Amino acid sequence: MRSNWRKTIMAFILVVCLASTCFLSVTPGKAAVISANPFNAVVQAGIYLSQYHWQDLSLEALIDAALHSMAKMANDPYTQYFPAERYRALQMQVEGEFTGIGVRITELDGEIVILTAFPNTPADDVGLRPNDCIVSVDGQDITGWTTTQVAELVRGEAGTSITLGIKRGDQEPFPVVIQRAVVQVPTVSSELLADGIGYIQISYFDQGTGAEVAEIIDLLKAEGARGFVLDLRRNPGGLLNECVKVAEIFCPQGWIVTVITRGDYEEHIYSETPPLDMPLAVLVDGGTASAAEVVAGAIKDYHVGTIIGERTYGKGSMQRLLGLANGGGLKMTYAHYATPAGHLVEGQGITPDVVITNSPYTRLIYQGPLALGATGPAVSSLEGALRTLGYFSGPVDEYFGTATVQALQSYQRDQNLAVTGGLNEATARAIQEALREAAEDAQLDKALEIVKGKI
């Protein structure tokens, strides 16, 4: 019996060694020359646990846990491991279409933070903003969760609803109900405004964005554009090569960005393209991040345009997506970057030349009926919306008082709505439509003023 047991153990060890050798043999690049010994222990532990632990442990789940731990050891919120299904979903997002609510999130100081809410998406429609923290999903506390775990919970079938607990600044957390949809991330939109000013909005730097912007500029110039406004607000970044193509349209010949990799090795990415040399203003805000900050930083350092708005997000690092043998993937920070003048963006952002904050009351957050005595952020949203429309002059707080009732009655009367003094779906829909038409954009107004003065 004892002899048979020894044979079993030896056979098992042989299987472990063979399994680890096979695992290493398919690892590409530099990993192939690393000593197999450290990795043998990882594979051995996984096989021991999956085959001999008193609980039924999945080898696949154990491998996933080990990979998650490796990524976490980087102590970098942007370095993450994605299991196969989530990695496929991430690749779909990179390609520009996914099912969800339309936000990009990150993990900062242990909190899940919204980096941006894409325009004209479910998240944008309910008023989610950059730097909002997600504290719960459908009532489930997500403290300590990774962005991957939260993203998997938020994703779902189009048409289904989800309730996020949102913490905004020093406010108490409040619920936001959002209906999922197929989200198509817009890249570039444009129009020719009055006085020959071309307006270009870039929502994300995707494959082909640089060429599309160059083509749009030529078309707008042919239509009579004599100056431009480049809108990078709520742009979370994207592909480095595409943002460089956009920056070099406006910047003189010279380097656009300095990429700083391991060992403080610096690589300067140059532009050899003659600049557009036309009046330019660039709009930025707290949702302007990463690749969008590369463009804003280069334009600011070369003094070829006026940066207007709010300090940008401050994501000065770059990531790569790397596929793994198990079908999963690794998003890994491989570099930081600096602007042409040497400004490190990470944690600092880009400070505008002209600081202007738009009114927060340009969108109504509707989560259900409200009436006299109601409290919470939804009430503040309603009062601010009514103030924007010229119906409310009292303090914008979180209490639905008699002044709020009277303002709402006046609005309902003028719009031939049922005069109830309470907020219902019909009134909310009318207010949202009116806000789209009436809301002022002080940042854009200032940009147009500056460009017009230089034409």
Image (cartoon, rainbow, N blue to C red):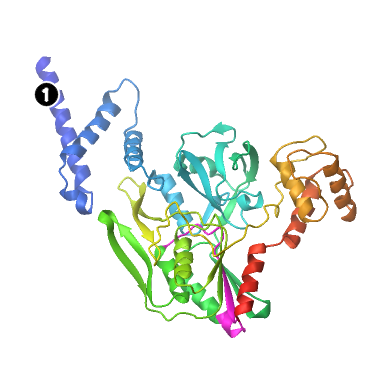
In the orientation shown, which residue stands out farthest toward the left? 3
Give the vertical position of 295 relative to 140 (above or below): below
Q: Which residue type does callout 1 highlight?
A: Lys
Tell me where residue 227 appears, x and y as whole percent: 58, 78
Residue plotted at (48% across, 62% down)? 292
- Which element carries disc 1, helix, strand or loop? helix
Quadrant for residue 348, please give it. Answer: bottom left
Pinpoint residue 313: horizontal percent, then vertical percent. 50, 54
* Residue found at x 25% / y 27%: 48
The picture places residue 416, in percent across and down from the top left corner, at 89, 54
Which quadrant would residue 52 be assigned to in this image? top left
The residue positioned 45% from the left and 61% from the top of the image is 291
The answer to which of 138 and 113 lies nearer the viewer is 113
Is residue 14 found left or right of 323 in the rendered image? left
- Name the residue that disc number 1 marks: 7
Residue 30 point in image, percent of width and height: 20, 52
Image: magenta residue range: 219-239
The quarter of the picture where the N terminus appears is: top left
13 within the magenta span: no
* Viewport quadrant of the C terminus: bottom right
- Vertical position of residue 5 compared to residue 86: above or below: above
The residue that appears at 80% across and 44% down in the rendered structure is 424
- Residue 115 at least partly seen: yes
